[in-house]
Amino acid sequence: MDFNMKKLASDAGIFFTRAVQFTEEKFGQAEKTELDAQFENLLARADSTKNWTEKILRQTEVLLQPNPSARVEEFLYEKLDRKVPSRVTNGELLAQYMAEAASELGPTTPYGKTLIKVAEAEKHLGAAERDFIHTASINFLTPLRTFLEGDWKTISKERRLLHNRRLDLDACKARLKKAKAAEAKATTVPDFQETRPRNYILSASASATLDDTSRPPSWAEWKEDYPGGWRRPCFFLVPLNPSVTRARGCLSLPKDRKLWNDEVDKAEQELRVAQTEFDRQAEVTRLLLEGISSTHVNHLRCLHEFVESQTTYYAQCYRHMLDLQKQLGRFPGTFVGTTEPASPPLSSTSPTTAAATMPGGPSVAGLAPPGEAALRLEEVAPPASGTRKARVLYDYEAADSSELALLADELITVYSLPGMDPDWLIGERGNKKGKVPVTYLELLS
């Protein structure tokens, strides 16, 4: 592999310089360009958004998939860009075990029949859970991951560039400051061309110590070795020519001032370039940080969709379990002893009649006598205590002619009869009348 050693050495030098400068800033030994308060607020808001998005994402993943091994497996499949294999939900697995148990223990026994009914309900619950996980992953988890893996990485990259531009800007400011201080110092140093005799003669002992190796260097050699105009201390003054007298270790030439002037001009030019790059990068980063507001709007929409999918899931679970209770002949507020035979399907027996035939069940005044299949709705009249309005929360399909089918969001009139099961009411809509479950209603004052 072909390495560019010059570039590598240059990058290493820049990295070391920035590290030193950053350390000095932390200890308060170097000046630091401060960002405006609005920019700092945008940075803090972006960091807070990132942190809370990560926490919400992780906890939602735990909610949808409590098994950590399964989450790791899904993560690996996602990183390998492969399709995640379909996994049986816990409800579906439980339904499979119950169905197998019923087949082995006897599907015609009361226990076997009940296992089959519960297995069917658990299968529906597992399918509803699968749909909920799929919908939540697409509508909620995917946008959160897209923000963290896409938009936030772009913001982080631009923030690092801005940090480096700020360090470069501060370094240019420090360089200009040092150059101006050196220029001011060089201006105050006297010129020995004006304060020393032009033809200074060394003593005999001093002249004897001078040989070919200690001769004064030429101007080109002196400038190349000591561009700043200063050498190590020396005790000899050597006359060179009528125009310039050099003193080793204690001389500042007229041209030395010009060198520092050039250095100041160069530092000012670098400072202007660094300031321009810093301002440009700050504007780019500011625009990205202001886009966090759009991210919040998008996440708000995704959150509403997540709530809708969760509401749908729990409503489906409630309906499936309510249907299972009807099939088992157990209704809210009643109890079926273990010694009783399995109840017949709801198509032939109404909930109220079944409740009336159970041991300890309350008798309903004004209803058909025990053993009769249907409720005589024409004999039911509103009580003297009055009626109430109720709003239907979910669609409800009537199990038989004694029940009233419901549609979500419609308004009906409801009332209760003495001795009636508290979880059921009589509902009226126009000229139609029938029993309705209280859990499907929102009673209005």
Image (spheres, grey):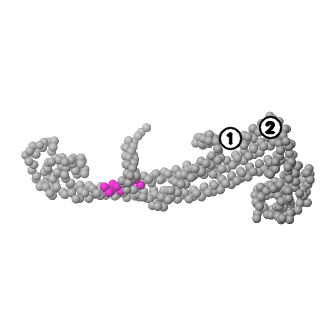
Question: Are there few (<14), some (14-19), or many (20+) residues within 10 Å of tag 2?
Answer: many
Which of the image's four quarters has the C terminus? bottom right
Please identify the dominant SS of the magenta region.
helix
Range of residues picked out in magenta: 166-178
**Secondary structure state at the residue bearing disc 1:** loop
- In the image: residue 250, left or right of residue 321: left
- The quadrant of the image that shows the N terminus is top left
**Secondary structure under the numbered disc 2 in the rendered image:** helix
Looking at this view, name the residue that lies furthest to the front.
360
Mark 1 vs mark 2: which is more N-terminal?
A: 1
Magenta-colored stretch includes residue 311:
no
Q: Which residue, given by chain and number where applicable, does mark 1 sit on?
A: 87
Please state the horizontal and vertical placement of residue 233, each as a whole percent of the image: 19, 48
Q: Which residue is under mark 2?
A: 102
Compared across the picture, whether 266 is left or right of 224 comes to right
Picture coordinates of residue 20, whole percent (x, y):
37, 49
Q: Residue at x 70, y 42 (%)?
A: 90
Q: CA distance from mark 1 to mark 2?
A: 24 Å
Q: Would you say 226 lies left or right of 330 here?
A: left
Residue 49: where, in percent of width, then height? Answer: 55, 54
